[in-house]
């Protein structure tokens, strides 16, 4: 007979995990971690207001997206995440409102260049979710354009977590990053984010086909989509090797993360539960920062 204490503890852990993952707090922390990776690669002190802004904006946008796409019967959804979100509707709305309100004072600390960039990203993110366009009286959002969903997600993430810190750091005259280095940093991050995003679309393959959403897995098929992920990561590794000036802790931390991400993607499948995707795959964004920080620390003793 199962121990009541272990059952209770297991239930508490799952409830905490559900809140962390499904409230989108975890993915917001991933955005912070990715910005921290950028600051570490630049060798500058992180700007706290930028980190806070990325956290709040990510939380607000992801919650907005989920609340906007409410299914007709959320309690009957096959996805635990959907059932949790709409079973805790007031919590989600409250978190979203807090995040949006918090953005107002945070924007006051930003430079004009950063504000323009973030405004552009906000417009793209909203257009991604809202059916703002129409053809033959059929309304659709940017995500419905064949193949564009992956590109937009990777673009928004890479520009937010790489270009925003660079623009803000440059505006504060802390460091001057060349255009070539900026493009390289954004490009590599784009490849990484795109690679770990595709498995989510593979998981939703049948659902996307039903809704006629032309994602990469729908267009290529499951096996070719997995191969596509590995090619993206391989391209990242190639760029990392070609343009690395010093094989330091940053290099090895990034390399280890990419290798692990490739392995996790290979292990992912349609049959994996939601925790695998939202914790392990999304978690590689946090892992990347931890790996870079740890490897850099270890290299001090070499």
Image (cartoon, grey):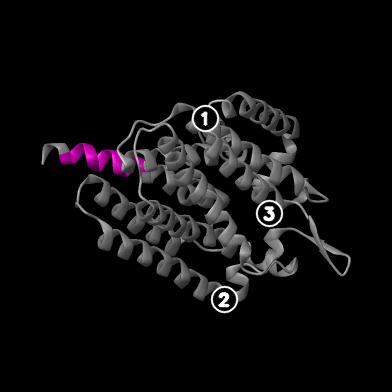
Q: Tag 3's secondary structure?
A: helix
Inter-mark Cα distance, 3 to 2:
22 Å
The residue located at (26%, 51%) in the rendering is 251
| Percent of width and height locating residue 115 | 58, 37
Q: Is the residue 7 above or below the residue 73 in the image?
A: above
Q: Which residue is mark 3?
A: 128
Within-10-Å neighbours for mark 2: few <14, some 14–19, many 20+: some
Q: Image quarter for residue 221?
A: bottom right
Marks 3/1: CA distance?
A: 23 Å
Packing grade of label 1 (10 A; few <14, some 14-19, many >=20) is some
Horizontal side, residue 126 vs residue 111: left or right: right
Residue 34 image label: none
Q: Which residues are magenta?
A: 289-299
Please give the label number shown on residue 220: 2
Residue 206, given in percent of the width and then of the height, sits at 67, 68
Q: Nearer the viewer, residue 67 or 89?
A: 67
Residue 261 seen in the current view: yes
Dot 1: what SS? Answer: helix
- Percent position (x, y) of residue 93? 73, 32
Q: Local crowd at mark 3 within 10 Å, few (<14), some, or many (≥20)?
A: many
For the residues marked 1 and 2, what is the alpha-carbon distance in whole angstroms? 38 Å
100 left or right of 177 in image = right
The relative height of residue 250 versus residue 231 in the rendered view (above or below) is: above
Main secondary structure found in the magenta portion: helix
Label ID, residue 52: 1
Label 1 or label 2, whichever lies nearer to me, is 1
Residue lying at 67% horizontally and 47% vertically, measured from the top left = 123
Expressed as whole percent of the image width and height from the top left, the position of residue 77 reads 73, 51
Residue sitting nearer the eye, 273 or 59: 59
């Amino acid at each position: 007979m199962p121990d009541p204490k272990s059952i209770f503890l297991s239930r508490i852990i799952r409830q905490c995990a559900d809140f962390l993952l499904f409230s989108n707090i975890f993915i917001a922390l991933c955005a912070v971690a990715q910005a921290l990776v950028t600051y570490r690669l630049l060798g500058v002190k992180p700007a706290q207001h930028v980190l806070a802004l990325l956290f709040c904006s990510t939380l607000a946008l992801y919650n907005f997206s989920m609340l906007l796409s409410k299914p007709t019967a959320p309690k009957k959804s096959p996805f635990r995440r959907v059932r949790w979100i709409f079973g805790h509707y007031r919590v989600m709305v409250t978190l979203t409102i807090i995040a949006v309100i918090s953005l107002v004072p945070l924007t006051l600390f930003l430079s004009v260049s950063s504000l323009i960039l973030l405004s552009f990203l906000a417009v793209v993110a909203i257009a991604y979710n809202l059916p703002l366009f129409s053809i033959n009286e059929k309304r659709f959002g940017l995500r419905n354009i064949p193949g564009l969903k992956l590109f937009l997600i990777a673009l928004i993430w890479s520009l937010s977590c790489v270009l925003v810190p660079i623009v803000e750091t440059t505006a504060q005259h802390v460091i001057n990053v060349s255009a070539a280095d900026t493009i390289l940093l954004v490009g590599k991050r784009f490849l990484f984010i795109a690679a770990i995003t595709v498995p989510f679309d593979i998981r939703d393959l049948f659902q996307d086909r039903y809704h006629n959403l032309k994602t990469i897995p729908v267009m290529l098929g499951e096996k070719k989509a997995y191969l596509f992920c590995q090619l993206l990561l391989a391209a990242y590794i190639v760029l990392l090797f070609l343009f690395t000036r010093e094989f330091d802790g940053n290099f090895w931390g990034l390399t280890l993360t990419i290798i692990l991400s490739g392995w996790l993607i290979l292990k992912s499948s349609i049959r994996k539960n939601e925790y695998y995707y939202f914790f392990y795959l999304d978690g590689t964004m946090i892992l990347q920062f931890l790996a870079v920080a740890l490897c850099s620390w270890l290299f001090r003793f070499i």
